[in-house]
Every structure is written in C-alpha cells, then in structure tokens.
Amino acid sequence: MDMEGKIFYHAPGARTGDVIPKYIDGKYQLFYLKNWKDPKAPEVIRGWHRMESEDLLCMGPETPIHVLGGTGDLIFWQGQWHLFACIFPDGKQFVTHYVSADGSLDHWSYQEEDTFGPDGVIYDKSDWRDPRIVYREELGEFWMFLAARAVDFHSQTGCVGLCVSKDLKHWEYRQPIYYPGRFNGACECPDVFRMGDWYYLIFSSYTTLFGNYYVKCRVGEERWQIPQNHRLDGRAFYAAKSAGEGQERYLFGWNPTKEVNTYGFWPDGMQAQDYRTWDWGGGMVVHRLTQQPDGDLKLSMPEGRKRIFDSCIKNEIRCRTQGWSIEENVYTAPEGAQQQMLLLQTLPGSCYVRADVEIRDARQAGLILQVDEAFQEGYYVYLEPERKRLVFRSWLRMSEEGGKTFPYDVELETPIRLAEDNRYCMEILMEGSAATAYVNNEAALSFRMYDYKDRGLGLFSLGGAVFQDITMKRGEER
C-alpha cells in the first residue's frame, strides 16, 4: 500500500487546510479547505472539498462542493441541510449561508440575502469568520459561535463571538461567549461540544502563542475554567475542530509544511529546509479525544493508525557511550550528570515507534529520530519532567549556526502531567517529513523533519532512566 499521505492526509498537488468534520449516518464527512500548491494548474477546482471515511484511514474520493470561502459549519433542520461559511471581499469579512439544493452534501445554493457581518457595536468590523452552529433545543435557538474581535479600549480583543437565531436567517448579536482579554487577533475556528459532565470550547490563536487552546465548563455552571493542559498539541498543529458519536470523539487539524516563502522569513543563505517557516496547510492530523478525571482533555493516537504498521523490525543495538546496562529489550542509563546515547536500526520512511521510559534522576530523556552514527545531527523528542513538558528539538540546535539563527529555548513543546510511577509511554507516528509524538495517551506533539532521512533511531538520557519495550514497525507494502 502507498503509505505517503495515508496517516497525514493530503491530496496530490495540494495541502490540507482547515477541516470541518461532521459525523453523519455512521460516517465521518470531512469537508476541508484545499490549498493548491499551483493555483494555476489545470486540475484546480476552487472551494470546499468533501470526502467521507468510516475508519479515518481510507479517505475519499474527494468531491468538490463549490462553496467558496473560509471555514464554517453544517446543520440539518426541518428536512434540509444548511451550510455556513465566510468570505473576505475587499478586506471585509462576512458570514455566508447556503442550503442543500437536492438534499445531498455536494450541491449548495447560496442565500445571498442572508450574508451578514459584525455589528460594529459589540464586535469590531475587522474580524468575523469561522461560524460554528449549535442548536439549543431547550431554548429553541441556534447559537452561532464566531472568530471575532470585541469593541474595547485596548488591543487584546480577540474573542469567540455569539449570535442567536430562531430560523437560521435572522441573527441577533450577543455578548462574546468567551473573551479572555488575552489575544491580539480573533480566536479562530471555534468548536463547542459536550463530553460527559463538561462543555468544551476549543479555538485557535495566531497571536500571543500560536496554536490551539481550550477551556472547559462543568454542566450546570457558567464559568469557563482554564485547564492544566491549556494548549492542545503545539505550533505544528492548527485549526482544530472535532466530531464524533457518543463517547467517541476525534480532533482534526493540520500539520503545516515548510515549502513556500510566503512571508519572506526564510534566513538568507540557509539551504536547510528545516530552517524555513511554516506554510498554511499541510497534512491532516487526527487525534483521539478523551477525558482526565478532572475534566481536562487528553489526546491519544487513534487505534486504527497502529494497525497499519504490522511488520516488526528487529532491534540492532550500538552503544555510543559506555554507561548503558543492556538486558533483553531493557536499556538502563545510569544516574549522574552525564548524557548517555544508544543507537538502533534505521528508520523506515513511514513507521510506528514505541518506547516505555522510566525517569529516575534524568533531567531529559527520550528518542532521537534520523540520528547519524556520531550523534551530531538528529531530531530529539524527549521528556523534561521538571518542566512538565514534551519537547521537540531539531538538528539545527546541534550547531553554532543554528543556535545563532534561532536564539530561543525550545522549538516545539506541549505540557504533560507527571506520572505517579515516573513511567511514560512514548509513541511516534512518522510518514515522510510529518510526525506526531504521543505520551501516556494524554498529550500529543506534531512536528516536521525535512533534511535527514534513512538514518537511525537513538535513545538518550541526561541522567538515570530505563528504556524498555522498544518497538519499531513498518507498514507492509501491498
């Protein structure tokens, strides 16, 4: 089977942008914004595209639905599908309304008279997009959540706006549903859902700290709470929206590529692709959503992903430092102030990697992907228990040039909870340049690796740690 684009979906010649996922009649209907790499190519069809999936592995085929504009939502009411999107004429922003022309999900009639923008009283006219529709049955009202900016006397006006309607045509402006006074830009792609005893509001921010955030509210209460793991994944995961049925729920976003110098940020003279800035869109990332006992959300790998990789690769061990204690699939790094390094076999282009890590006195411990024989270059994915985080650090940091170019502490990070037994299960999915790491079925961190491939898997620990059950699997070619 062709593995490229199966785990992190992208169509040929295009990047996957914002996904609008819906669970309808036992299938996931995935509408998405398609970013064509060559907008002038003869195969380009503009507007939203749709594909369906039962297992979130077999996608498509794609169907263009000719809805022009940005992120939105669908809802079924009185025997008819309604779709809401957003448009940006002449620098302005408006919400648009479509209805299904034939009862399907592929043919839509634009209701031009229903187009509306911000009121300029509660909401600033600069931002008005990404509508999300929820029917409040107990109120007999449709609630539309929007990426917006409030009218206020300071700049931190990014919010999730709210409009209310009885008929999906006439909308009343209400005060923001969430206005933290924290963001210089609109809170994009809002998503609202209930799971168990909690309501959740997820949104994306491109200012303050780029990424996906969420807040929670217990059923029966009105105050939003900021959870311990306030962000979902890291910088290389964006525009997250969810869908599911019953207790099954998944979060859909995109891992951006680094292929186009859209903003002119690429460092002059730096040939390495890993130096480059992030694009808009890339490969689709799907996380499974579950809950902590306190209501915080957890991100874990969808089970179907693991089943693709069914061919185990035997471990080949080569110690690069002398402190390791080796038993059968148990590798122990001694306590102390010295870093220990161990090299294993070559990584396939697409694979699943797992390692159970027990932290003793280690300040850092984890895996190195695509590492060379001398451990000079590679991509580090590791735990920092003292800082309660999972960290990604690329080979750029192993050189003086990289350190001068990027004078910051970490490249990518996501929060984790400390395990009571100091044991952490690390799992990594790799497909081409794209990858996602998971820890304890709780936290996820997406990243890219461009400049090195066909090299080894490494283990490292700064201090005492035990690595065991090291597993590497590839997918069988069919």
Image (cartoon, rainbow, N blue to C red):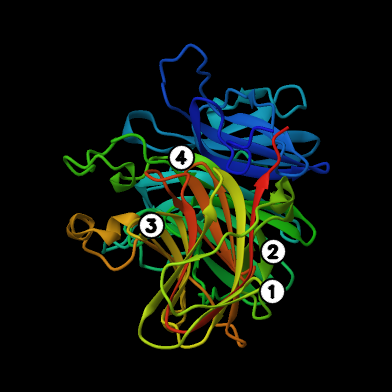
Residue 427 lies in quadrant: bottom right
**Amino acid type, mark 2:** Arg
Q: Residue at x 75, y 56 (%)?
A: 137
Q: Which residue is mark 3?
A: 210
Out of 151 and 59, give the one closest to the viewer.
59
Q: Which quadrant holds the C terminus?
A: top right
Q: Earlier in the sequence, mark 1 or mark 2?
A: 2
Badge 1 or badge 4: first in the primary sequence:
1
- The Cα atoms of the two marked residues, 4 and 3, are separated by 14 Å
Answer left or right for 157 relative to 290: left
Is 332 left or right of 186, judged from the image as shown? right
Name the N-terminal-most of marks 2 and 4. 2
Point out which mark residue 219 bears: 1
Is the residue 59 above or below the residue 339 in the image? above
The residue at 65%/58% (across/down) is: 301
Residue with the mark numbered 2: 194
Q: CA distance from mark 2 to mark 4?
A: 28 Å
Single out the mark in the foreground, 3 or 2: 3
How far from the left and from the top, in percent, is residue 356?
61, 72
Q: Residue at x 21, y 42 (%)?
A: 270
- Residue type at numbered disc 3: Phe
Mark 1–mark 2 contact, CB under 8 Å? Answer: yes
Q: CA distance from mark 1 to mark 3?
A: 29 Å
Q: CA distance from mark 3 to mark 2?
A: 25 Å
Looking at the image, residue 201 sits to the left or right of residue 127; the answer is right
Q: Nearer the viewer, residue 368 or 3?
A: 368
